[in-house]
Image (cartoon, rainbow, N blue to C red):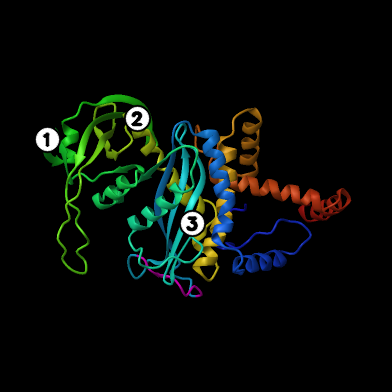
Amino acid sequence: MNSTDTLSAGLRALPGKNTSLASTQAAWRFYKNDNVTLTKLHEPLLIAAHDSVARHCSEYALCVHDWSRLNYRKHASKRDTYPITHETDVGYDLQSSIILSDQTGQPMAPVAQRLVTADGSYATYQEEALSATIATHLDEVTHCIAKLEQQNFVKPLVHIIDREADSVAHMREWEANKYLWLTRSRKTPSVEFQGQSMPCAKVAEALNFKRIRRVIYHGKPQWQWVAETPIRITRNTKPSQKKQKKPSIPGAPIAVRLVVSRILSDEGEILAEWLLMTNVFAVEASEIALWYYWRWQIECFFKLLKKAGHDLESWQQETGLAIAKRLLVVSMACVVVWEIAAAKGEKAQALRTFLIKLSGRQMKWGKSFTNPALLAGLWVFLSMQEVFDSYSSEELEALRETAQNFLM
């Protein structure tokens, strides 16, 4: 549960009477134990996800997929790192999938993790290390989606992916398997609109927009405007041309909705625009736009894993597999924090206020808490409980008197 920093990124022992070294050795043995598999470690997270979907989702469960590079360039002890994009960007590639509520956008649980190393990749949805033949991000996430669909959640999953998923080959594969998906389109690819082929950006210019809601954009409230239209994706699949030139491959048209979300200033200036494509037809366009707006929660998850919480890129485990195991453990801490953040009622509010005080962190004006601050405060609270459980009142009084001698 503890938040960490660059200079102390290892396990932090609770202040009981056991030594910190004993806790550190126990953790080292745990992560190195071959019987501790990723699928076993991931079971509590799946249980939490199924429970949360049943309690917090109305019609759908939103499953957001994204990638984050883990940079370990200065970690010479890790022998299975590799140059992810260039020579100085050395480490591992992490693909994560988290479930959000379709009512509030609140994150509930990570349902899949995949860590790619130089020796192969390790996923929570398969016992053995995955082969290197699944190479591209979209191949990875398509494999992940297939595994998640086998989980049989009580609500249908809608898979939300950023602009990298604008791949007609993968869309056709998702359609063939009857997956529900929502992705962001690039501006230039052509689609069929009212019988004509034209770029998505040009289609957006022909639509009538409605003012929907106020949203926060770059820290300021702005108006969101939304328009929609049915379109068909008819273009050919273009295989990768990196190794050799390959002909394009025709395929069946895909009937989807184009939902265009714009953020406008009060003066009417377009501050941002998202061209969204989805095969979910039974939901209002304004809700589709809101779902994509909530996609940012996975970026907050990566932030909680990294500098704002667990400082993932400072961990000293020597293999990608050990990193992946520890990642699942801290993901459980993230689930606890999300539950505290989403809880309703006076008691939950009082707990959040108390944890923020214990964290010692300052909040922005108008913001009562942040997830990293809740995580830090929760660790302090657990430490306090451990102290009272491990030391008698006489021992604590003696320690207080000794400390007072140094404070005078």
The boundaries of the magenta stretch are 77-84
Res. 292 visible in picture = yes
Out of 359 and 252, give the one closest to the viewer.
252
As drawn, 291 above or below 32: above
Q: Amino acid at mark 3?
A: Tyr
Categorize mark 3 by other alpha carbons within 10 Å: few (<14), some (14-19), many (20+).
some
Res. 4 visible in picture = no
Residue at 63 percent of width and 61 percent of height? 11
Q: Amino acid at mark 2?
A: Ala
Residue 236: x and y, percent?
17, 51
Residue at 58 percent of width and 56 percent of height? 329
Question: Which label was assigned to residue 282?
Answer: 2
Residue at 29 percent of width and 51 percent of height? 170
As drawn, 34 above or below 186: below
Out of 291 and 193, give the one closest to the viewer.
193
Q: Quickly name the residue at label 1.
A: 195
Secondary element at tag 2? loop
